[in-house]
Each structure stands twice: as structure tokens, then as C-alpha cells.
Image: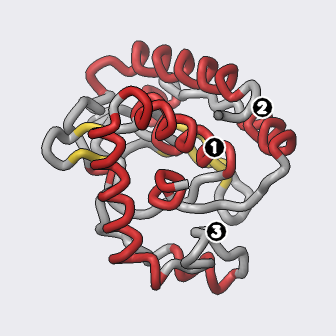
Amino acid sequence: MAAPHDSDLIQIVDASLAEAARKAGAWLVCRPGCTQCCYGAFAINALDAERLRAGMAALRAAEPITAQAIEERARAWIAAYGADLPGDPQTGVLGTSEEGQQRFEDFANDAPCPALDLTTGLCSVYAWRPMTCRVFGPPVRTAGADNTEALGHCELCFADATAEQVAACEMPVPQELEEKLLDELGSKGETVVAFALLD
């Protein structure tokens, strides 16, 4: 079961994405089957992991064949990359040391996400996808290592757009609400998608 009030967060983010996409128009080229952002490991927080677990529970009940295929891909992913995980290879919890975080930068960069159906080019858990997946594409403001803010977007999007045009399509992300929900959940540990799909 997903964390309490997670649906509130998702509703806000999805509405923000829809508005950003409306403003961006043809500059936002994200479409079903475009999978460039589905390759490479990335950290997900406890809220994302709970949402994925809830999604897998729903799929096991409603679409057991789909759920089984996802689980098989997740097990294959862990068999291929788990031993090199910068963290606990049994639980999937990522390490928090500076050395571990640096190792994660080069970890499984070419690996397809186990939620990705390579036959269709679609995400098998799209309704329950992590926040990183929900905000990737349109311009989103992030804090850099030097605490300066930057507006980043998918490199395939906004070709020939000026900085002002990009900024006009910014997608606001309710980070404070997400942090509040994480505090309520009581877990700050991070993992990767494959482990959450099997829990």
C-alpha cells in the first residue's frame, strides 16, 4: 500500500506536468516509445519505493503475467548489477558515504530499467513510477553541488528554444510536500527500482 497522502503528491505533480507540457508544445518531444531516460540506474526514495510496491501488488492481483515478467526482469537486473551496487546488495539500500555516492555515478549507466518493456518501449509500472520519471523531460529547477539553482530538461527536448522560452515552460515540483511525506513515512534510505519491484 502506498504511503498516506502520496496520491495528493502525485495529483499535484501530474497536473504540473500537464501544464508544463501544454506550455512547451512541440518543444517537449517525450512520447511513448522514447526510452532514452529509461537507461541507467538512479536513486529512488522510500516514497517512490512504497509506490512501486503498491503498484506491483495491484499488478499481481489484476495482471499476474505482467507482474511476473517485471519480476523476472528485476531479478535479472539484480543478478547482473547487484554485486556492484554501492550499498547493501541484499536489501538494495544505497550507501550514504561520499565514496559510495561517487561510485553510484558510474553504476549500471547502460542498464535498461527493469520496469521497461523492451518489446513495446513502454513502462510497465507507469502509473506508479518514481518521481524522477515523473519530472524528467520539461524544465525543472534543481540545486547544484555549489547550492546554486539550475533549470534542467531532457537533452532531446527544447531544441532551438531560447533560455527565456525554456524558463517559461518550467515545471514546478512540490519538493516540500514530498519531504513532508518522507518524514511521515519515517525513512530516508534510498534504493533502486529493481529492488523495490521485488519487495
Q: Which of the numbered marks, if any, corresponds to residue 137?
A: none
Which of 54/37 is in front? 54
Q: Is residue 174 above or below residue 70?
A: above
Residue under the point 38% across and 59% down: 74
Location of residue 94 by image quarter: bottom right
Disc 2 target residue: 177
Which of discs 2 and 1 lies nearer the camera? The answer is: 1
| Residue 55 higher or lower than 191, as above or below | above
- Residue type, mark 2 in image: Leu
Quadrant of the image containing the N terminus: top right
Which amino acid is tagged 3?
Answer: Val
Other residues around mark 2 within 10 Å, as few (<14) / some (14–19) / many (≥20): some
Residue appearing at x 20%, y 41% in the figure: 121
Q: Is residue 131 visible?
A: no
Q: Earlier in the sequence, mark 3 or mark 1?
A: 1
The residue carrying mark 3 is 93
Residue closest to the eye, 160 or 8: 8
Check whether the beta carbons of the residues at disc 2 and disc 1 lie within 8 A of each other: no
- Left or right position of 136 against 16: left
N-term mark: 2 or 1: 1
Q: Earlier in the sequence, mark 3 or mark 2?
A: 3
Label 1 sits on what residue type? Glu
Q: Disc 3 on helix, strand or loop?
A: loop
The residue at the far left in this view is 119
Horizontal and vertical percent for residue 173? 64, 31
Q: Nearer the viewer, residue 160 or 7?
A: 7
The residue at which mark 1 appears reads as 50
Residue 8 found in image quarter? top right
